[in-house]
Image (cartoon, rainbow, N blue to C red):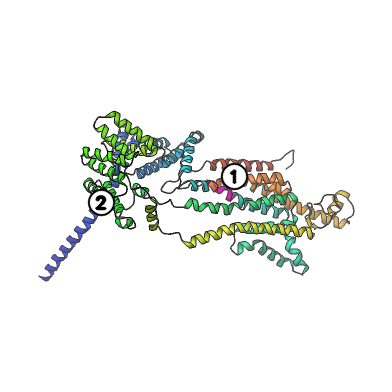
């Protein structure tokens, strides 16, 4: 008997718990109902586009329009992004025409000049070949214009498109240091080997000490650019006048790093707080009263009425805004919203009075004028309706287009509410709810910027000090024929040692055995020089000419290679802008940089072909 009672009680508790669970599921399903319905209509739209039937597409599009309910502008962005993603997938499957049909539907009905739609169109057109690249140029220009005009996206676009300068400066520094180190490789070693040799240090310790010295910045965890600058400073006494001038230019290029570091926070800066944007933009969670504790009681009541308007609870919205009459500072917004709530309740005469009072309290408001035009058209007063629409268009062109687009997406007349406007006090109240930036982050950024400016200045001072020391203290030169280091020479050419001058020009002055050894030394040095030249010719166009001493021509070609590599590696990636889930198409700078890089490498590789019977 006791066991039966226990089983009955357990069953009752399970039923009660299950009922609560089912109630929670029903509530969550009720909350998700609009998004589920919109997703369902999205699937219907995909099916219609795949069928190719214009009638089916129109029916599916009309079903989507019926979902635009809140203020007549239920956010269409998720639908636009989902359909754009599907269009891109169609292009990836080799069906760009079907994707372009979806893009055309988005542009025509819901999202004209939307960045995601423009980017999708550019991607699909480019998949059609060179002609598609040319056809996509107008969309690329329009997308660029939108990014530059948008206050939250402007700096991100600028920083992303000048990032090639940072990469070019880094590549140029590494390439120049490597080329000069290979060109003056014998005297480069002489800088530390000669003092140690005078102290009796052997060959193997010399090699180990030299390897540690030239790689010390990397071994202690510094940037490889520090090692490159160290190499350049060690080579300072051995460079000719032209190479010294170009080295100054390379060092000054390094100031691009701290300058761009100063620009990056502007690209990552969150948008300024705006109560209007907070009301109009879709929120992942409903607005709660607790979020507005810093606001006045009248503002809190206004926001409560706004939420009731979003939920289409017209009776509650009417009661809320009616209670704010004569109590709230923004009476124009209160009167308009009260009229909009009464319009949706069928109280047309009372709504007309409220709109008229709102127009007197806030003349030239786009929402009020459009609401009056709706009433005029409803009463068959076409002339007044058109006049009010034209007045609204002149007063706020962009807002007019948004509201008209939302109005045309509905089959019934719709009145528009006005959000609570921004004031300095309300903006400050929103700022107080935001977390302040971390002082550690600001401190580390300041340190990196200071180090970025200090590093090139320090290297420049060290380079100039080494040049000044080379005037006070004689440094050796590397022979261009045998590679031997020497201080003085009998040759009229400053880079040819006396032994090579006597051997190859005067053809005298050397014993037979020494002549043979000298010829072997020259052959070994020239063979290694030939191999280094060919490797640079294949891997680093322009560096081969600098290695041979044709500094001006070689530096221009090397600078072009670094510039093209910066375009490809620094700008080619696709950024995703704040508030968007799909990245933009790759920048046109990527194909331009790729073509320039290919031309420069091909031009360099052609030097390997035999010329005049010689290789």
Q: What residue is rendered at 29% in x and 50% in y?
A: 328
Q: Position of residue 590 (x, y in %)?
A: 54, 43
Foreground pick, 280 / 459: 280
- Name the magenta segment's main secondary structure: helix
Q: Quadrant of residue 70?
A: top left
Q: Is residue 447 visible?
A: yes
Q: Which residue is disc 2 drawn over?
A: 29
How far apart are the alpha carbons under marks 2 and 1? 54 Å
**Front in this rendered view, residue 556 or 399:** 399
Query: Around disc 2, counting alpha carbons within 10 Å, would you say few (fewer than 14), some (14 to 19), or many (20 or more)?
Result: few
User: At x 85% / y 49%, what residue is drawn?
Assistant: 492
Quadrant in the picture for the N terminus: bottom left
Asked which secondary structure carries label 2, the reply is: helix
Residue at the left extreme, as displayed: 1
- Vertical relation: 423 (above or below) 378: below
Q: Which mark is residue 564?
A: 1
Query: Over which residues does the magenta segment extend?
Result: 160-167
Most distant residue in the right direction: 508
Q: Circle 1 sits in a helix, a strand or a loop, which is it?
A: helix
Residue at (81, 51) in percent of width and height: 494
Judged from this view, the residue extending furthest toward the bottom is 2
> 229 or 354, which is in the foreground?
354
410 vs 503: above or below: above
Count the numbered circles shown. Answer: 2
Give the class, few, some or many, for how many residues have Cα within 10 Å of label 1's Cα (few <14, many ≥20): many
Q: Position of residue 53 (x, y in %)?
A: 32, 32
Residue 137 placement (x, y as % from top left): 50, 36
Horizontal relation, residue 426 to residue 191: left or right: left
Work out whether residue 57 or residue 301 is closer to the camera in this orientation and state it. 301
Q: Does label 2 or label 1 sit earlier along the sequence? A: 2
Q: Is residue 307 left or right of residue 237?
A: left
């Amino acid at each position: 008997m006791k066991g039966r009672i226990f089983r009955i009680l357990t069953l009752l508790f399970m039923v009660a718990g299950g009922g609560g669970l089912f109630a929670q599921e029903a509530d969550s399903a009720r909350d998700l109902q609009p998004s589920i319905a919109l997703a369902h209509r999205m699937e219907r739209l995909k099916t219609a586009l795949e069928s190719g039937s214009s009638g089916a597409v129109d029916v599916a599009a009309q079903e989507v329009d019926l979902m635009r309910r809140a203020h007549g502008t239920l956010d269409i962005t998720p639908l636009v992004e989902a359909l754009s993603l599907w269009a891109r997938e169609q292009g990836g499957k080799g069906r760009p025409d079907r994707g372009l049909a979806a893009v055309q539907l988005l542009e025509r009905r819901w999202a004209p000049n939307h960045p995601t739609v423009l980017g999708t169109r550019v991607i699909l057109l480019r998949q059609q070949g060179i002609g598609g690249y040319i056809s996509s140029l107008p969309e690329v220009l329009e997308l660029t214009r939108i990014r530059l005009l948008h206050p939250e996206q402007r700096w991100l676009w600028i920083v992303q498109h000048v990032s090639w300068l940072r990469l070019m400066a880094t590549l140029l520094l590494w390439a120049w240091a490597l080329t000069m180190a290979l060109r003056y490789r014998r005297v480069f070693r002489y800088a530390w080997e000669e003092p140690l040799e005078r102290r009796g240090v052997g060959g193997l310790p010399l090699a180990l000490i030299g390897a540690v010295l030239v790689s010390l910045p990397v071994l202690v965890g510094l940037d490889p650019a520090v090692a490159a600058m160290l190499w350049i400073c060690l080579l300072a006494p051995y460079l000719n006048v032209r190479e010294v001038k170009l080295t100054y230019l390379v060092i000054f290029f390094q100031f691009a790093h701290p300058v761009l570091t100063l620009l990056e926070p502007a690209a990552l800066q969150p948008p300024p707080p705006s109560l209007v944007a907070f009301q109009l933009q879709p929120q992942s969670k409903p607005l709660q009263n607790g979020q507005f504790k810093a606001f006045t009681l009248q503002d809190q009541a206004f926001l409560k009425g706004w939420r009731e308007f979003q939920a289409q609870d017209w009776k509650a919205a009417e009661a809320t805004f009616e209670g704010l009459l004569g109590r709230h500072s923004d009476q124009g917004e209160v009167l308009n919203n009260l009229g909009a709530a009464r319009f949706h309740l069928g109280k047309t005469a009372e709504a007309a009075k409220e709109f008229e009072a709102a127009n007197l309290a806030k003349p030239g408001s786009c929402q009020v004028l459009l609401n009056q035009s709706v009433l005029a058209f409803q009463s068959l007063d076409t002339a007044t309706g058109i006049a009010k629409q034209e007045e609204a268009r002149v007063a706020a062109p962009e807002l007019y287009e948004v509201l008209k687009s939302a109005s045309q997406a509905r089959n019934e007349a719709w009145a528009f509410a006005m959000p609570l406007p921004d004031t300095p006090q309300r903006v400050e109240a929103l700022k107080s709810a935001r977390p302040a930036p971390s002082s550690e982050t600001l401190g580390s950024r300041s340190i990196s910027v200071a180090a970025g400016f200090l590093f090139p200045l320090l290297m420049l001072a060290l380079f100039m000090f080494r040049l000044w020391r080379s005037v006070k203290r004689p440094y050796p030169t590397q022979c261009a024929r045998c590679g031997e280091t020497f201080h003085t020479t009998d040759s009229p050419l400053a880079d040819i040692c006396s032994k090579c001058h006597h051997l190859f020009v005067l053809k005298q002055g050397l014993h037979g055995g020494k002549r043979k050894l000298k010829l072997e030394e020259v052959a070994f040095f020239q063979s290694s020089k030939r191999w280094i030249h060919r490797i640079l010719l294949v891997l680093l166009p322009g560096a081969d000419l600098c290695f041979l001493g044709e500094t001006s021509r070689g530096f221009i070609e090397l600078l072009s290679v670094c510039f093209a590599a910066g375009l490809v590696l620094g700008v080619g990636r696709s950024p995703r802008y704040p508030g968007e889930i799909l990245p933009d198409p790759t920048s046109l700078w990527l194909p331009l940089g790729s073509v320039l890089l290919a031309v420069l490498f091909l031009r360099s590789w052609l030097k390997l072909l035999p010329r005049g019977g010689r290789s």
